[in-house]
Image: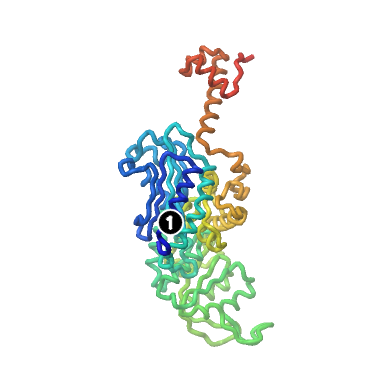
Amino acid sequence: MKENPEKSVTLLSKLLDLVREEIPSSRALFLVINRKNEVVFKKAWKMNEAENDGLSSTVIRRALEKKHPILISNLEADPCFGHDKSIFRKDWGSILCLPLIIENKPVAAIYLDRKTGLDPFSTQNLELLTVLSRPIHFILGNNFEFKDLKEEDPAGVKDFLIGQSKALRRIRNLVERVKDSSAPVLICGESGTGKELIARAIHHRGARRKGQFVAVNCGAIPDHLLESELFGHVKGAFTGALRDKAGLIEEASGGTFFLDEIGDLTLQLQAKLLRLIQEKEIRRVGENRTRSVDVRFISATNKDIEKETEQKNFREDLYYRLRIVTIEIPPLRERKEDLILLLDYFVDNYCQEMKRERAYFSPRCLELLINYSWPGNVRELQNEIQRCLIFSGEDNFIREEYLSPKINPQGETSQNSSFSYSAAKAEFESRFLREALHRCDYNKSKTAEEIGLSRQGLFKLMKKHGIEAKRKS
C-alpha cells in the first residue's frame, strides 16, 4: 500500500468487521496480495494458524485463479472440494469466497465459512458481500500501482488466444512456428471463432509486424468492385475511375494481407490471386505494366474448401498454394474448458471500457452460460457479456434475468430460482415423505418403519411440510 498505509489498514479492518456483522460466519479471513502473489496484508477472525487446515488457502487460491466467487452450501457434497478429505474437518459446512479484481488482476480475497448445523451461505449473502466489497475496491485501487502489470496487446490480438484447452495450446504453438515465415497460412473455422484474431496474432508477433496488416472480407464487396479494391486501377480504367489508385494488396506490401472468406472469391479473381502468389507481381485494372509487391498472405474460410474444390467452385492449384500451413479453429462448444477464462476476460475488459466496477455472475447465471452451446462462438460470447453489463446497470451482480432468452429460455430469475441448501433440503424432504406415505397407503406406522423414523418423528415432519394425515382414496 502506497498512500497513508496506517489509515488504509484501519479502514480495511473496519470494513471486514462490517462484513462479519452483516454476514455472520464462524470464521473470516481477508488478505491482499501483490503482483508476485505475496500476501502483503492479512486480517483473520477466529482463524489462527493451528486452525488453518488448508481449507481457506485452497478455496482462496481457486477463487483468485478463476477470478470468480466461490459459494459452497454443503462442503462435503461439493464435487470440487468434497473428495479431498485432507483439506477440511467435518465440522465446516458452508463457504463463501469473493476475489477482488482490479485492472484484470486478482489483488485480494474475502473468505467466510460456517460450521455444519448453521444455515449455509446463500446467493443473497454473495450479493451482499459484492456490495460490501465496493469500498474495499476503492481503497485498494487508490493504494496499489497497476501500470507495470498491464501487458502490451497490439490490436487486441490476445482476445482469442486466451484459454488452456489442448486445441488452443496447439494453435498458440502453430502461431509461434509460422509467425516469422512468409509462407501462406489458411485458417479454417466457423463464423465467430476468431479467425482474423489469429491472423493478427501471426502478423503482430512476427517479422512483418512493422508493416501494414490489411484485411478484406471477400464476401462483403461486390464482385465488380473487388478486383479494383484488391489490385487498384488507373485513371479512366472504368466509369468513375477519376485518378490512379493503389489497391489494398499494394498497401500491404512489406506486411500481411488477410483475405477473409476466401471461398467467396470468383474463379476469375482466384486465377489472378494465384498468379500474384506465384510471381509476387500485380497489375492494376486498366494498366499494362506490372508492379512488384512483398506480401505475406493469410486467408480464412468457414467453408469446406476441399468440397468446394471437388465441386469446381474453387481452384485446386490455388487451394494448395494457400494451405501450405493450415490452422483449424474448433468451435467454442468443443473447448468448454476455455469458456470461464474467456468470460472472465471479456467481463474485465468491458467493465474497464464502461468505467464501472468489476461485475460477477450469480451461480445460476454462470451455470446457464456454461451449458449454452454458443453457435455464434466467441463473437456471440462477447456480445452476450456486453448485453448483460448494459442490462445490469449499476448492479455488480449479473443475474440470470439479464441473459438473452436463447440462453435463459425458461426466463429464470434470481427471485424464483433458489440456491439455498436449506430450501433444497426442505423440498427433498417434502417430496420424499409424500412418496413414502403414498406407497404405504398413508399408514403412518408402516411409513415410519420404512423410512427409519419414529411415529413422533414422522408426525413432526408431516406437520413441518403441511402434509395431511389421510389415506389415499
- Compared to residue 438, the image places residue 272 above or below, namely below
**Would you call the spot at circle 1 few (<14 residues within 10 Å), some (14-19), or many (20 or more)?**
many
Query: Measured from the top left, where is residue 50 in percent x and y?
Result: 30, 41
Q: Which of the 4 quarters of the picture holds residue 296?
A: bottom left
Residue at position x 66%, y 86% in the image: 242
Residue type at mark 1: give it.
Answer: Pro
Q: Would residue 163 be visible to someone looking at this image?
A: yes
The quarter of the picture where the N terminus appears is bottom left
Q: Residue visible at 60% across and 46% down? A: 408
Which residue in the structure is indicated by mark 1?
A: 106
Which of these two is toward me, 198 or 70?
A: 70
Point out the image quarter for the C terminus.
top right
Q: Residue at x 52, y 43 (%)?
A: 125
Of all residues shown, which one is farthest toward the right? 239
Label 1: state its secondary structure. Answer: strand
- The image position of residue 18, as x and y in percent, is 49, 47
Q: Residue 230 at what x, y percent from top left?
A: 56, 76
Residue 30 % position (x, y): 41, 50
Evaluate whether residue 317 shows in this view: no
